[in-house]
Image (spheres, rainbow, N blue to C red):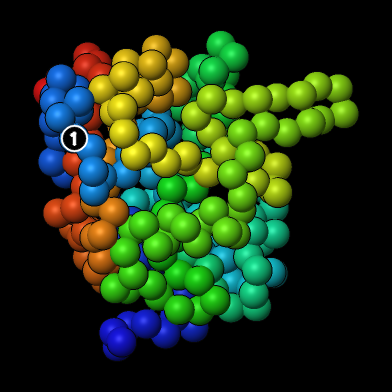
Amino acid sequence: MSIFSNYSEFKYIYPPRPEAAITPALLSGLGAGWIAQPKYNGSCAVLFINGNHEYKLFNRKNEELSLQNPIQYTSLNDSEKYMVLCGEYLNKNKYGEDGRPFNHKFIIWDILVWKGHYLIGETFEKRLTLLYELFGGSRGFVSESDMVIFNHLLTTRVENVFMAPAYLDGFGELYQEITRTDLYEGLVLKKADARLEPGFRERNNHSWQIKARKPTLNYNF
């Protein structure tokens, strides 16, 4: 067990982020052992929830995220101890699957701390399974006036909080499909059996992740 396993008071943890990039043409050659999640066009964020009474939302630079709308994040926590989630805070006015702006939402794509235990040494596959157990895997919800179904988002029990779905194959075709939508930048592929390492430095856990992004004015592979 790691000496950092106990997480009982706030200490910033940098999110695990990919550094290596591949051209989308290579995605079709990847399969067994990899798990893909959509790469969303927002601000990478880390959510620290202390029991059911307090939370802090930080960006990937260890700065508290500004200009955020109120969301009932504490309702995500299933214990009185710390939970730490990594995700994307959508604040760039990108268009969603219905062609309308999809703003001020939080999309979970990893869990770092659960019930006060920093999950160092746990595989990405196991952490992903935990997320599904905690938040389910529904792709839609029913409101007072409508039924909403998503293709590449999973809903949670908390309004405006979603979870990134996981894909095990067909990465090339998946990339071509999702990048037609403004909200989706591409894919992040993660090794299923990769074990979480401590994230107290900005550069961490990069060796088991790769990204494939659509080109923009500021980015091209």
Residue 146 visible in this rendered orientation of the protein: yes
Above or below 191: residue 194: below
Above or below 92: residue 131: below
Q: Is residue 155 left or right of residue 203?
A: right
Q: Give me the residue at 56% from left, 11% from top.
A: 99
> Residue 75: percent from the left, percent from the top?
70, 59
Q: Give me the residue at 49% from left, 83% from top.
A: 8
Above or below 177: residue 201: below
Residue at the spot of label 1 = 30
Among the 4 quarters of the image, the one containing residue 104: top right
> Residue 57: percent from the left, percent from the top?
50, 55
> Residue 41: percent from the left, percent from the top?
39, 29
Amino acid type indicated by mark 1: Leu
Residue lying at the far front of the rendered structure:
32
Q: In this view, does 8 lie to the left or right of 161?
A: left
Q: Quadrant of the C terminus?
A: top left
Above or below 7: residue 21: above
Q: Quadrant of the N terminus?
A: bottom left
Residue 69 visible in this rendered orientation of the protein: no
Q: In this view, does 148 lie to the left or right of 3?
A: right
User: Helix, strand, or loop for circle 1?
Assistant: loop
